[in-house]
Amino acid sequence: MAFHMLLYPFLAGAVVYCVMVMVAARRYLKDRRGTPLNAGGAAALPPFSILKPLRGLDDGLDENLRSFFRQDYPEFEILLGIDEPGDPALAVVERVRKEFPEVPSRVLVTGEGAYANPKDHSLECMAKAAAHELLVMSDSDIRVSPDMLRTFAAEFRPEKMGCITCPYRAVPGKSFWSRLEAIGMNTEFMSGILVARMLEGMKFGVGPTMVMRKEALEKIGWFSRVGDSYIDDFLLGKYTADAGYDTELSAYVIEHRIGGEPFLKNVKHRVMWQRGTRFSRPAGYFGQLFTYPIPIALILLAVSPASWPLAAGAFAFRYAAAIATAVTALRDPLFPSRWWLLPLQDVLAFLSWAAAFFGNTIIWRGRRFRLGEEGRLIPAK
């Protein structure tokens, strides 16, 4: 059998996946329209505690923080956690807090803690100190609009709702490689989340911003079961669902400001996350092969130029799926202006996926770890 014929099943599978992405995006949009974003008066709006773990200076940190202080909501507090008092983020925090004296806020110096993932220790300290039942756990590189909490309030009205996880629209920094990564996040990563939601429901979390009931978090053991994992966000959602609570993908789309990493750092970052997927969700990692129709089509063209109609069809389906996710579901302004970068992004993503098959270590916050089952971080010598 000719080699190019062996590629046909993979290309067909990738096209089927693209169709699933389009259906999943449409279903998400349909469900999202039913969310009463601003329904109810002040009495119907429960209070929130916003938890912000901080470490170092992200690009635009001050404006990211201001967007949370500007919430159009009657009652909320903001807790800001840092590992040590010498962290440079503290000066930014204090400057922003002075701009919003009317918003209750506190700074907690949490230390490193016992978990391999220090962010989870910081979140646990803040969660236990929070005054309110509903906890918004959001990374420092997130920017939001003033109606975020009103959306969460509507989504948490069912008492069984334990965890809401937010889709995100990646916003790049100034580097070319950052723009490529943002296109990948908005067309590839989020597509996978929408398909998983359609097939099995949201039985996992997505890290940049999650909202949980303190009751649910306490029931699953706070962060003790996830603090040593590279995929702590995924597991928080999973354990919450396993505990009998409802989980869902929010109607609210956050902005994930990813900064402007140079080429080598960007590639290492990509391979690191792919390697984490390989060890935490092996089936999902190998299944990602079907999310790369353009690289498969290019290989097919290289070995069988006469197969160009099939390759062209694969390109068309990939672009249609990308539009359904990035433009229609996430309202991403980047993809319509940089649509021609999609093939390059997909090739780089495919090569990163292939490279992640080798090796079992990652560098996480300056420390070297070996990856174990469920993404466990095991200190490497």
Image (cartoon, grey):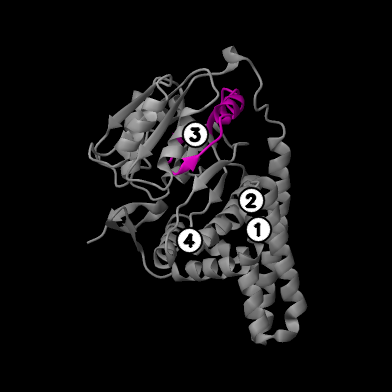
Q: Is residue 132 above or below residue 179?
A: above
Whole-angstrom CA distance, mark 4 to mark 3, is: 24 Å
SS class of the residue under badge 4?
loop
Whole-angstrom CA distance, mark 3 to mark 2, is: 20 Å
Residue 56 in percent (x, y) is at 32, 45
Label 2 environment density (alpha carbons within 10 Å; few <14, some 14–19, many ≥20): few
Q: Name the residue carrying label 1.
A: 337
Residue 303 in percent (x, y) is at 65, 86
SS class of the residue under badge 2?
loop
Q: Amino acid at mark 3?
A: Ser
Whole-angstrom CA distance, mark 3 to mark 1, is: 26 Å
Whole-angstrom CA distance, mark 2 to mark 4, is: 17 Å
Residue at position x 68%, y 36% from top?
Answer: 32
In the displayed orientation, state which residue is furthest to the right: 309
SS class of the residue under badge 1?
helix
Q: Amino acid at mark 1?
A: Ser
Label 1 environment density (alpha carbons within 10 Å; few <14, some 14–19, many ≥20): few
Q: Is residue 300 above or below residue 53?
A: below
Label 3 environment density (alpha carbons within 10 Å; few <14, some 14–19, many ≥20): some
Residue 302 in percent (x, y) is at 64, 84
Q: Amino acid at mark 4?
A: Ser
Q: Name the residue carrying label 2.
A: 333
What stretch of residues is rendered in magenta? 137-163
**In the rendered structure, which disc, 4 or 3, sits on the residue that comes first in sequence?**
3
Q: Is residue 85 above or below residue 3?
A: above
